[in-house]
Amino acid sequence: MLNRGLETADLFSVEGKRALVVGGTRGIGRAIAWRLACGGARVAANYVRDEAAATALAREASEANLDLEVVRADVTSVKGIETLCEAVADRWNPLSILVFAAATGVHRPFGELTLRHYDWTFGLNIRAFFDLVGRLLARFEGDSSVVAVSSEGAVSAVPQYTLVGATKGALESMVRHLAVEMAPRGIRVNVLRPGTVRTDAWEVLPDAASRLEAAVRRNPRGRLTTAEEVALAAQFLCSAAAGGIVGHTLVVDGGARLVSG
Ligand SMILES: NC(=O)c1ccc[n+]([C@@H]2O[C@H](COP(=O)([O-])OP(=O)(O)OC[C@H]3O[C@@H](n4cnc5c(N)ncnc54)[C@H](OP(=O)(O)O)[C@@H]3O)[C@@H](O)[C@H]2O)c1
């Protein structure tokens, strides 16, 4: 009889994998944590400030019988990184999936940006990723996946986005270098670059409404990307089906990047 190998569903499965989603209790990270847990992964969803959002996620996951725990730790601090690494060593060891979805930023014209803003933005968006991956390297199992969440600002000039864009460019470059070094160990490192997704992150921008409207107009599908669409792509990158994908940037924007103006 013909050996059909793994069934299609198995190829896309994350069943039984141990996953850490940094910034996993709100927005895109939350959708990724939820999707991975729905796929049967054992998920640690990390956060730092919003206790209510974390508690709500933990409760919903428990009601849905999902294996998802929330872990409070500020990944910009040594103590926070240590807390998170200890939790992984304790409960998600060996680690199969790391998704880095946390980000911050100061949205101002270049002339108003200071070194304090620079340190704040780089401290989370790139320094914490560097530190965390370095410390967790020994924890990864042979067949594992790291996904760094980037944005269009990595490659385009977005208004008042200088610092965030610069960190995302650095993140994408670091992923390419890491990807080559980690490939022999069976760790696939990739970038997921979502289009505009309506999340809390938009609430802090004074011109959010007009920018979101512009994003809808620019998108060939006439709507924004959803966090769930991004999460499905994340699950794919972490599955056996993506076994040949290394150091790639997967854009999930409904085609928005193809439209100018
Ligand atoms: N939204 C978009 O349109 C869009 C587009 C392209 C790319 N992205 C990227 O997608 C990712 C998620 O964005 P989002 O809009 O979903 O963000 P969000 O809704 O603001 O969620 C951010 C998450 O990161 C956590 N976090 C923040 N600082 C942290 C720290 N120091 N330590 C640990 N966790 C921390 C937050 O925890 P608390 O809840 O405790 O604050 C929260 O869970 C980011 O990398 C962003 O650049 C977003």
Image (cartoon, grey):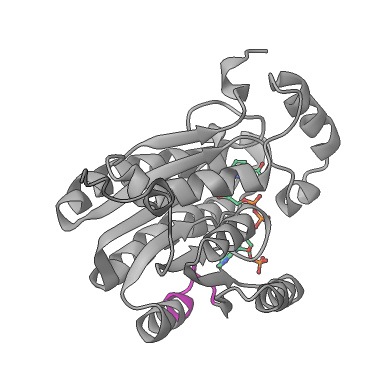
Does the magenta run of residues contain 74? yes
Residue 234 drawn in magenta: no
Q: Is residue 157 above or below residue 27?
A: above
Residue located at (37% from left, 55% from top): 146
Q: Is residue 149 visible?
A: no
91 left or right of 184 in image = right
Report ligand 1 position as a quadrant.
bottom right
Q: Quadrant of the C terminus?
A: top right
Left or right, 178 with respect to 36, comes to left
Of 162 and 198, nearer the camera is: 198
Whole-percent x and y of residue 254?
62, 28
Give how far across and how far down residue 51 sits, in percent: 71, 77
From the viewer's perspective, is 261 left or right of 194? right
Write the start and end of the magenta stretch as one range. Answer: 73-81
Q: Residue furthest bottom?
A: 90
Considering every residue shown, the one lying at the far front of the view is: 1
135, above or below 161, in the image: below
Up-down: is 163 above or below 49? Answer: above
Residue at 43% over, 56% down: 13
In percent of width and height, residue 66 lies at: 59, 73
Q: Nearer the viewer, residue 21 or 158?
A: 21
Task: Using the image, determine if residue 168 lies above or below residue 182.
Answer: above
- Can see residue 61? yes
How many marks do you count on the picture? 0
Residue 61 percent across, percent down from the top left: 66, 73
Residue at the image position 62 percent from the left and 14 percent from the top: 259
| Residue drawn at the location 27% of the way across and 45% of the way down | 4
Q: Which is nearer the eye, 113 or 172?
A: 172
